[in-house]
Image (cartoon, grey):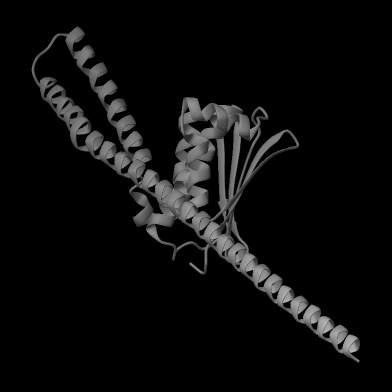
Amino acid sequence: MASSASATNISLLIFAASGVVGLLLFFILFIVYAYQRRSLRHKQKEQELQVEMKQKMLQALIEGQERERARLSRDIHDSLGAQLSTIKLYLAELQTYPLNSNTDNLIEASMGLLTTSIHDLRAISQDLMPQPLKKMGLINTLRTYCQKLSVAHKRKVCFTANVNLLSISDSTSLMIFRVIQEVISNAIKHGDSRTISIKLSDQIHELIINVEEDGIPYNWEEAKARSQSNGLGILNIETRISLMNGILQQTNIDNKNVVSIKIPMHGE
């Protein structure tokens, strides 16, 4: 009987020890699991903070560029443009005095050059800071911009839109305008295109921007790598689209360079 009781006690001890070990293992696993969950949450928080910081840095970069564009636009319009206009008035006044034919021809030629320079300066100032956006809206501003590009660069720049963007904010309008401006500039620079087609459409709270051009096929990533050393065009395109939570795709279809951009409007 004693041996039987002893065996029972040993079995109970083994069972109890097994239970204690099991509980210890459970607590250890629970602690490890909790630590991993906490570590994962911490890592996710760090990633979210990094993304947020990157977004803020990109936003600050774009806002800084726009402030500099606005300053340059004001300087061109208020200072240099005003000076050229004053010189033109002086020359016009000088024409009222009796002059010989050679001098009169020189004055007339100078006034012609000044008129062209003033026109060019206004165009540059307008490109730097497109004031008509607030007055005309994004669609009409883009249509006018493409018409001017067709004349200035002797290229066929076509613009169509079947979307209503009257309610979007000024900052979003400017951002979209800059994206399209940079895409067209990129097409002219890298693709050497003769015909550029820009189309805006909407699809369930998304703005769809398609730009097709018949220039030399090029690789977007290679062009972006070149832009890092020679300019910020493509990087600015991707930065602005990222700030609007958009998606960009660039492909070569039927010997055409095609840039497709989708931007969520969120009911704007």
Is residue 212 positioned above or below 264 on the image? above
| Residue 157 point in image, percent of width and height | 55, 39
- Who is closer to the viewer here, 4 or 197? 4
Residue at 12% over, 24% down: 90
Q: Quadrant of the N terminus?
A: bottom right
Across and down, in percent, residue 246 comes to: 56, 54
- Residue 176, above or below 192: below
Asked whether, in this view, residue 162 is left or right of residue 167, the answer is: right
Of residue 245 and residue 155, the one placed in the foreground of this image is 245
**Which quadrant of the figure has residue 197?**
top right
- Taking 19 as reference, is 64 above or below it? above
Instruction: Say which residue appears at 71% left-offset and 77% top-offset.
Output: 20
**Figure label count:** 0
Looking at the image, which is closer to me, 33 or 153? 33
Residue located 54% across and 33% down the image = 186
Residue at the left extreme, as displayed: 97
Residue in the image at 36% along x and 45% along y:
130
Q: Quadrant of residue 2?
A: bottom right
Query: Left or right of 233: which side holds 135?
Result: left
Q: Is residue 110 above or below residue 213?
A: above
Residue 139 at least partly seen: no
The quarter holding residue 80 reads top left
Estimate the x, y position of residue 19 in percent, counting from the top left: 75, 79
**Residue 119 in sight from this viewpoint:** yes
241 with respect to 85 (left or right): right
Residue 265 in picture, x, y percent from top left: 52, 63
Question: Position of 123 compared to 250: left or right?
Answer: left
Q: Residue furthest bottom?
A: 1
